[in-house]
Amino acid sequence: MTGRAEAVGNSTADVVVVGSGIVGLGAAYAAVRRGLRVIVVDRTESPVGATIRNFGHLCIGAQSGEARRYADASRDLWLRLSRDAGFWLRESGTLVAARHEEEIAVLDAAASDDDGIRMLDATELLRLAPLRRETIIGGAHIATDLQTDPRAAAEAIVRHLATLGVEFRFRTAVTGLGPERVDTTRGTITAAHVVVAVNHDLDQLLPEVAERNAIVRCALDMMRAAVSLPHPLSAPLLTGWSLVRYGRFAGTPQADQLRERLHAERPDLAALDLNQMYTQLPDGTLIIGDSHASAVQPAPFQPEAAFSAFLTEAEALFDMPTPRVLERWQGVYAKGPTEFLIERGDEGALVLAATTGIGMTTGLGLAEENLTAAFGWAPAMEGTS
């Protein structure tokens, strides 16, 4: 494809990145901005994993701690990449729809520190989101958040990095790692530094690292639908089911009470491990989801009950007729006991992964910060593409 240097050329590089998902692309971006020769290796033809199978929601303001630090760094990098690589991204913030007093309590507690969360009454929320009036009592707006189209963004970032000199070797599998060496199905590459960013496939390349960090796979169901709304959704929309998942909200006493209520009222949705949220793409279609199921190797079979629940809940929330489903898919991401895996493998490679479902939100910052620290790099110069 245009913008991809796939032929095996010089097999020496300053940095070899294994994996072309958002963390791998972030690693390549960090290295090439410092004038280094970079080769990215991936067994697929293009990014096809969690990086394109998500909402395109960069949920920065709902994070806390380490995740918030990476998310804030990622925000600046996303804005720069969208400008330079020419893909759609909007500074929309995020809306949260509250249907119960317990949800208002969670939002009030988070908004009390005045860090980018503004409470909304029902009237203002309805101006911003075409929801059924009778279901909403209020909500909030998270100002820092961004939205993109993940499929278009990943392709554009690959093309842009290729113009900066990054060499992409797609359809090339890694067969082994050694000190300053990556063995592939198209030959051996020597490099000063190796970064492994293969997300849920870590157990196939570095099983000992995956086992040591208790990494499994989380499979999620999602869909995209054609909808008829009275007016567009002005930003990604979260619900109470989202508040009990994201770090800034989930650890509070108010979230514990909300979780208890949601699970008691809707055990069917709790069994799906639901994150009821929505994003609307520029073409007007709505991404709807999602459910979660974790295992070392989740079953590939997607229960129709999950998709039926998605549609039923969407119709109950939005002022619209039944959506027309255009696509269904299964996303998979690495899951572990902590939010991130950052480790030096036995072969000396720097291993990076977001081990919750916030890779798009944090991945660019995760790569930038940890490559800089691990390899002793100076900060990239301002203005560098």
Image (spheres, grey):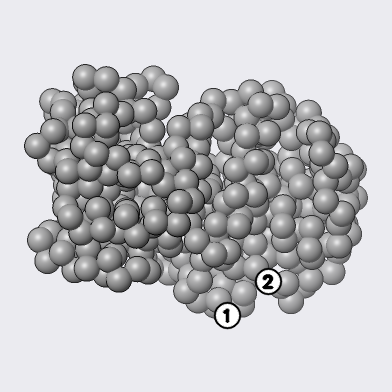
Position of 217 relative to 321 (above/below):
below
Mark 2 neighbour class, 10 Å CA radius: few under 14, some 14 to 19, many 20 or more: some
Report whether 288 appears left or right of 176: left
Q: Which quarter of the figure has residue 385?
A: top right
At x 83%, y 51%, the residue is: 379
At x 79%, y 65%, the residue is: 374
User: Between tags 2 and 1, which lies in front?
Assistant: 2
Position of 130 relative to 374 (above/below):
above
Q: Disc 1 on helix, strand or loop?
A: helix
Q: Which residue is mark 1?
A: 212
In the rendering, at what x and y percent does residue 180 appear?
Answer: 86, 64
Disc nearer the start of the sequence (2/1): 1
Q: CA distance from mark 2 to mark 1?
A: 11 Å
Q: Which residue is mark 2?
A: 343
In the rendering, at what x and y percent does residue 338 appear?
Answer: 50, 71
Q: Is residue 270 visible?
A: no
In the rendering, at what x and y percent does residue 328 appear?
Answer: 31, 38
